[in-house]
Image (tube, grey):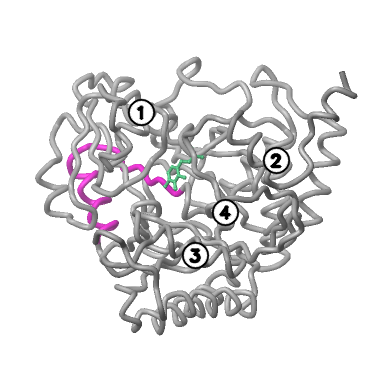
């Protein structure tokens, strides 16, 4: 059997691609090469080509590829204890839960394996909290247009982008969607049926959108006055991404619960929902669970990420490098191919002009060995590792400038 699988192992990159295309579901459209290793902000494909990776695994690689401290922590923990289930406490989960509540305004933690699962826990808390208090009318959610909360059916239902809903209906009922940043619209939508308001402090997938000042504070006041919970989805903005540990700190607003994922495990699958003591009773004994969630291996990765972030001062670094990046992108925004530059910290976007072909732009950047991803369909999204250097960013920005000086245009604009 070993011999058989070895003879089936592809040799050239084209053979690898062919095997990937024929064996994997076609719900993705990956770039036409096969990655096999990485270091810091660089990755290498199976043919030995090296790329500058400014996608950061879609805002996941907080400490870069193959960080030795993270790799060692995962290796050591794997030799000690990988999984015990939620039937037992494990030391790593206790340590990580304590570290997260220590660094934030929250008191309690629930561990998941992904962002959408952290949001499912948060949505269930949002409903069950009222039920526990005898209010069975409060079952509805208020969400924003352009939001992204994940692909499982609950998170999908509160995701404010119709393209992700296509063919997946019926979604969960009682979700009302209003424009992001519009406090008056949110006020008008709130009622005695509202269980919770869910919002990303900075919209990521929807196109990198920073809310107007006062918006998140206004949502806090609104939730308090109407008796609903305020839930923040910080899956993309957590762990220093915006130059603060959590993005909410920029505005000094503490929601009742908050979801974290992407950067938390540095690439190891891990998510978390944090909540305050006040609402912690919303998920009582038996009301929610995850088999893998909080396993010692994932939590060891989460602890190593926090240790690296502290040792390398990555939150502060992300704020500085983010300011540098924002400045450079603002200059690029003067090109006719660009609409505007926007973002916070190392979550930055460059909105392309209407006539520019976003997919072809990414492809031309790949030809220059620079990897970027899109948000909102037409926004070049920069979410590199938090320890990226200004030199590495400049290398990528030179390629972006070259491509956008003579950009690929849409065939039928
Ligand atoms: C990526 C993302 C999710 C979904 O996370 P998964 O780990 O893919 O389930 C949810 N919310 C936000 C804001 C995200 O950026």
Disc 1 from disc 4: Cα separation: 29 Å
Residue pointed to by mark 3: 382
Q: Secondary structure at mark 3?
A: strand
Contact flag, marks 1 and 2 (Cβ < 8 Å): no
Residue in view at x 53 percent, y 77 percent: 397
Which of the labelled discs sits on residue 154, or is there none?
Answer: 1
Which of the labelled discs sits on residue 103, or is there none?
Answer: 4
Q: Secondary structure at mark 1?
A: helix
Q: Nearer the viewer, residue 341 or 412?
A: 412
Q: Secondary structure at mark 4?
A: helix
State which mark lies toward you, 4 or 2.
Answer: 2
Q: Nearer the viewer, residue 24 or 233?
A: 24
Label whose residue precedes the other's in the sequence (3 or 4): 4
- Quadrant including the N terminus: top right
Label whose residue precedes the other's in the sequence (3 or 2): 2
Disc 3 from disc 4: Cα separation: 26 Å
Label whose residue precedes the other's in the sequence (3 or 1): 1
The answer to whether residue 374 is above or below residue 138 is below
State which mark lies toward you, 3 or 2.
Answer: 2
Query: What main secondary structure does the magenta stretch of the protein show?
Result: helix
């Amino acid at each position: 059997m070993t011999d058989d699988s070895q003879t089936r192992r592809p040799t050239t990159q084209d053979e690898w691609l062919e095997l990937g295309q024929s064996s994997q579901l076609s719900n993705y459209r990956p770039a036409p090469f096969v990655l096999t290793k990485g270091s810091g902000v660089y990755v290498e494909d199976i043919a030995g080509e090296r790329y500058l990776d400014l996608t950061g695994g879609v805002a996941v690689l907080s400490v870069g590829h193959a960080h030795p401290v993270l790799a060692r922590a995962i290796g050591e923990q794997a030799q000690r204890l990988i999984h015990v289930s939620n039937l037992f406490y494990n030391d790593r989960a206790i340590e990580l839960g304590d570290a997260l509540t220590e660094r934030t305004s929250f008191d309690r933690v629930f561990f998941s394996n992904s962002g959408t699962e952290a949001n499912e826990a948060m949505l269930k808390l949002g409903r069950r909290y009222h039920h526990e208090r005898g209010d069975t009318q409060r079952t509805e959610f208020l969400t924003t247009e352009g939001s992204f909360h994940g692909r499982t059916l609950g998170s999908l239902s509160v995701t404010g982008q119709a393209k992700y809903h296509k063919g997946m209906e019926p979604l969960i009922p009682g979700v009302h969607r209003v424009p992001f940043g519009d406090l008056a619209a949110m006020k008008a939508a709130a009622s005695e049926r509202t269980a919770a308001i869910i919002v990303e402090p900075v919209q990521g997938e929807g196109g990198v959108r920073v809310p107007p000042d006062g918006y998140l504070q206004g949502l806090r006041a609104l939730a308090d006055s109407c008796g609903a919970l305020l839930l923040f989805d910080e899956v993309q903005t957590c762990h220093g991404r915006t130059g603060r540990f959590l993005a909410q700190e920029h505005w000094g607003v503490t929601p009742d619960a908050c979801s974290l994922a992407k950067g938390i495990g540095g690439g190891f699958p891990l998510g978390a929902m944090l909540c305050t003591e006040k609402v912690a009773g919303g998920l009582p004994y038996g009301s929610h669970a995850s088999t893998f969630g909080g396993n010692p291996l994932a939590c060891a990765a989460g602890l190593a990420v926090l240790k690296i972030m502290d040792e390398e001062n990555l939150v502060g670094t992300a704020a500085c490098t983010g300011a540098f990046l924002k400045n450079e992108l603002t200059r690029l925004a003067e090109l006719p191919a660009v609409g505007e530059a926007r973002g916070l910290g190392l979550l930055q976007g460059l909105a392309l002009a209407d006539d520019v072909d976003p997919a072809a732009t990414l492809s031309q950047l790949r030809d220059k060995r620079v990897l970027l991803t899109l948000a909102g369909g037409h926004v070049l999204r920069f979410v590199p590792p938090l320890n990226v250097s200004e030199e590495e960013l400049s290398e990528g920005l030179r390629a972006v400038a070259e491509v956008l000086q003579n950009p690929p245009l849409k065939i039928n604009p």
